[in-house]
Each structure stands twice: as C-alpha cells, then as structure tokens.
Image: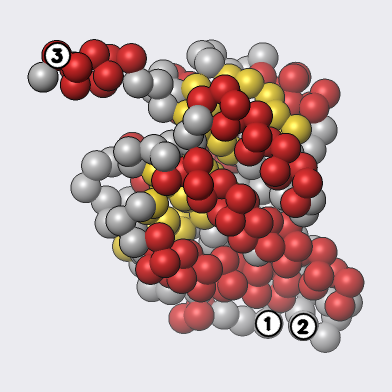
C-alpha cells in the first residue's frame, strides 16, 4: 500500500510531441507541461524548438526529430530510453499539406512527400516507440488526423492531405487491434485551426484544436481504436 502511494507520487508522465515547436503541437506541449508532464518537443529545427520552448511554462525539453528519417527517430528513442526507460504518451502531430489541389493536379512527388510525413511518419514513430510505450502502465498514441480524411466526407480537393489522413485513420485501427491492452491508440480531428497550415481565417484557436488531444492523453475511461472530435466519437 505504501509502495503504491510512493510510486504514484514519484511517477512523472513522459510525453513526446512531433512537430511540437509550433501550431497545435506547441499548444499540446504547453497544456501537458501545465499538467506536470515532462514534455519532449520534437522538431527538425533545434533552433526553432529552443525558441518555442521559451513559450512553455513547466518541464519541456527540445529533441531533434525528423519523422521522415528512421535514424533520427531511433536516436530520439534511445535518448528517452536512457533517461526514463519508458514513454507514456506519443503525439503523432507533425504534418504537411500541398494545398487544395485535386488528384490530377498533384504530382506523384507531392503525394509521396505528404505521405512520407503524414502517414509513414506516424507509422515509423509507432513502430520504433512501441517498446517504450509498452513499458508505461498506460501507454497511449494520439494520431492528429483530420475529418478531411474521413471516408464519409471525401471530395477531390486537398487530395494528398486527405489521402494521407485516410491512411493514418486506417493505421490507427490496425495498431489498436495489434497493440490490444498494451497501448491505447486514438485518432483525433482538431478542426479548422488558426495555424500556419490552417491560415488566419480558420474558425478555431489552437487551444480549442488541442483540447481533444489533451483529453485523449489524460482521460481514464476513453476507449481506444476510435476517431474523435470535440471529445466525441466520429465516423471514420
């Protein structure tokens, strides 16, 4: 009994956020740090990450991380393993878009570029970090997806982005079934958020965009293997 109380008191939750130096990723870092998590802000550009860290109150560390580079991912995993021996929450947040172009106007290279970051990035991250996540008593993967990838809502615009998010949603289901009780896996849609990607005319603040992601990381009862927006389940 005493050991349980001590371990709970001393247990610090460790989170890793890809693309954590701006937009929704930065807001996730801020909100987790406010909840006393130790947050690793993953970013390709360490100078940008160091600058972004100044905006976060709490325990946050910048970590060099390029989700398109397996070597970079393994290096980050080794660092976290050496320091903590586990990871509690992974936010696959890094993402890019090639704009509103349809299938015919999008080059194959553009499709590959978007898929490499938005789909293969989370796939690489999940494979490399699974062991560390399984060392947590409550390991979780939160894939920052989009309703634009919902099969019920597809149209011809933003072709590369939509396809990447449809694939990410499918990956979420598959990982959830494969990881079963070891690690919970979720997909979430932040909505149209005022970020560099969303633009200034977007209707949501970054705080509103990050809210469901934080809820998925912290709520004890939420069910894995599902797609959420505004803390409610939505159609794939």
Closer to the chain start, of discs 3 and 1, is 3
Of 38 and 101, the residue lying toward us: 38
Closer to the chain start, of discs 2 and 1, is 2
* Residue denoted by label 2: 103
Task: Give the residue displayed 79% in from the left and 51% down from the top.
Answer: 69
Q: Are marks 2 and 1 in contact (CB under 8 Å)?
A: yes
Residue 88: percent from left, percent from top: 43, 37
Task: Give the residue displayed 73% in from the left and 72% down from the top.
Answer: 160
Closer to the chain start, of discs 2 and 3, is 3
Q: What's the distance in space between the residues labelled 2 and 3, CA to CA? A: 60 Å
Say which of marks 2 and 1 sits in front.
2
Say which of marks 3 and 1 sits in front.
3
Task: Give the residue displayed 34% in from the left and 61% down from the top.
Answer: 180
* Residue denoted by label 1: 156
Graded by Cα atoms within 10 Å as few (under 14), some (14 to 19) or many (20 or more), the crowding at tag 3 reads: few
**Above or below — where is 191 with respect to 234?**
above
Quarter of the figure that contains the C terminus: bottom left
Of 66 and 236, the residue lying toward us: 66
Residue 134: percent from left, percent from top: 42, 46
Of 25 and 136, the residue lying toward us: 136
Say which of marks 2 and 3 sits in front.
3
* Residue denoted by label 3: 2
Residue 106, by quadrant, is bottom right
* Total marks placed: 3
Residue 73: percent from left, percent from top: 70, 44
Left or right of 131 in this view: 231: left
Left or right of 160 in this view: 229: left
Label 1, secondary structure: give it.
loop
Label 3, secondary structure: give it.
helix
């Amino acid at each position: 009994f005493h050991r349980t109380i001590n371990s709970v008191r001393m247990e610090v939750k460790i989170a890793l956020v890809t693309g954590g130096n701006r937009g929704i990723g930065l807001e996730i870092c801020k909100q987790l740090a406010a909840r006393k998590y130790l947050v690793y802000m993953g970013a390709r550009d360490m100078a940008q990450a160091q600058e972004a860290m100044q905006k976060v109150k709490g325990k946050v560390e910048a970590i060099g991380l390029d989700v398109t580079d397996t070597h970079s991912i393994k290096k980050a995993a080794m660092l976290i393993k050496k320091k903590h021996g586990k990871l509690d929450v992974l936010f696959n947040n890094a993402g890019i878009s090639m704009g509103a172009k349809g299938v015919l106007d999008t080059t194959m290279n553009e499709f590959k570029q978007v898929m490499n970051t938005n789909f293969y990035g989370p796939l690489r991250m999940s494979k490399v970090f699974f062991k560390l996540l399984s060392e947590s008593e409550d390991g979780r993967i939160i894939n920052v997806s989009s309703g634009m990838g919902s099969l019920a809502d597809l149209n011809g615009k933003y072709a590369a982005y939509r396809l990447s998010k449809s694939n990410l949603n499918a990956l979420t289901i598959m990982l959830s079934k494969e990881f079963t009780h070891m690690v919970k896996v979720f997909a979430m849609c932040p909505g149209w958020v005022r970020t560099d990607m969303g633009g200034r005319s977007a209707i949501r603040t970054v705080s509103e965009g990050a809210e469901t992601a934080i809820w998925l990381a912290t709520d004890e009862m939420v069910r894995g293997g599902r797609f959420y927006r505004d803390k409610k389940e939505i159609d794939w």
